[in-house]
Amino acid sequence: MIFTVAQRELKVLFLSPLAWVVLALVQFIVAYLFLLHLDQYLLIQPQLATLDNPPGVSEYLIARLFLPASSIYLMVMPLLTMRLISEELQSGSFALLLSAPISMTEIVLGKYLALMGLLSLMLLLTALMPLSLLMVVPVDLAALALAVLGCWLLLAAFAAIGLYFSSLTAQPLLAAVGAFALLLFLWLINATGQSEGAELLDYLALSAHLRGFLSGVLQSVDLIYYLLLVVAFLGLAIRRLDNMRLND
């Protein structure tokens, strides 16, 4: 049943002009950043060649591409998640799901899988940009794979948070504003720099855990952090919908 819901939601997502506009806009901006940093690398390559251990093009580009790309994903995520449940609550069609012989867990996971399918496509299109360099220069595939994994886990956390806020209200705009506010807070929570409790703030920050992946280091703490966020917010969304069913 989860995959049935996911298949239905994927059709809705890909039939929505909003999804295609977001995909096109994100790829246009990311492609511009990729070409900009590639041009910068070519300009400073003579200076880099004088170093004992100069960075390769992929080493230079990966963090400079995926870190700003993740910020762009954060900004567009509420637009993709706000309608997942809110719109059905607003139209009243969600009442049919509440009365159907299907669990709220299956509904939430189905919608979440559909959204992750769209987000995985978005990330794949981004990853193809540095991969295209294979035609002319060697690319550090291991570092690229770690960067893609980190961004995919980040998107999974973004999606879970957005889905939860979509379950809280029948107003898609409110769901988008709430999701964006929390995502931005978690992204910038450690931006104050060195202060008392800075280590805790670093652990809570979404961006801090992504940097480990972008630097080519796979740490269990980063994996656990993102997985905990996904499980926690999906669990909250399921509980919210279960309470709606009980009160219906």
Image: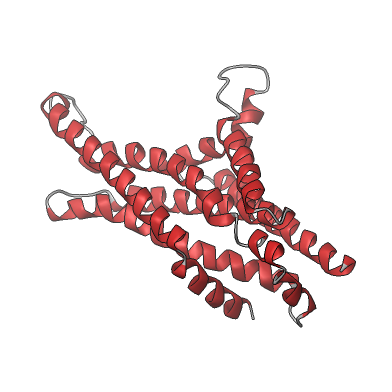
Residue positioned most to the right:
247
How is the structure coloured here? secondary structure
Of residues 40 and 226, the one nearer the viewer is: 40
Please tell me whether residue 238 is drawn above or below residue 187 in the rendered image: below
Image quadrant in which the N terminus is located: bottom right
Please tell me whether residue 200 is drawn above or below residue 165 in the rendered image: above
The picture places residue 182, in percent across and down from the top left corner, at: 64, 40
The picture places residue 147, in percent across and down from the top left corner, at: 40, 47
Count numbered badges in the picture. Answer: 0
Q: Residue at x 61, y 49 (%)?
A: 224
The picture places residue 131, in percent across and down from the top left corner, at: 25, 54
Of residues 243 and 126, the one nearer the viewer is: 243
Please tell me whether residue 164 is drawn above or below residue 181 in the rendered image: below
Q: Left or right: 123 with respect to 231?
A: left
The part of the image, by quadrant, that contains residue 42 is top left
> Taking the image as drawn, is residue 216 in sight?
no
Of residues 129 and 181, the one nearer the viewer is: 181
The picture places residue 95, in percent across and down from the top left corner, at: 76, 72
Q: Residue at x 51, y 37 (%)?
A: 207
> Taking the image as drawn, is residue 54 in sight?
yes
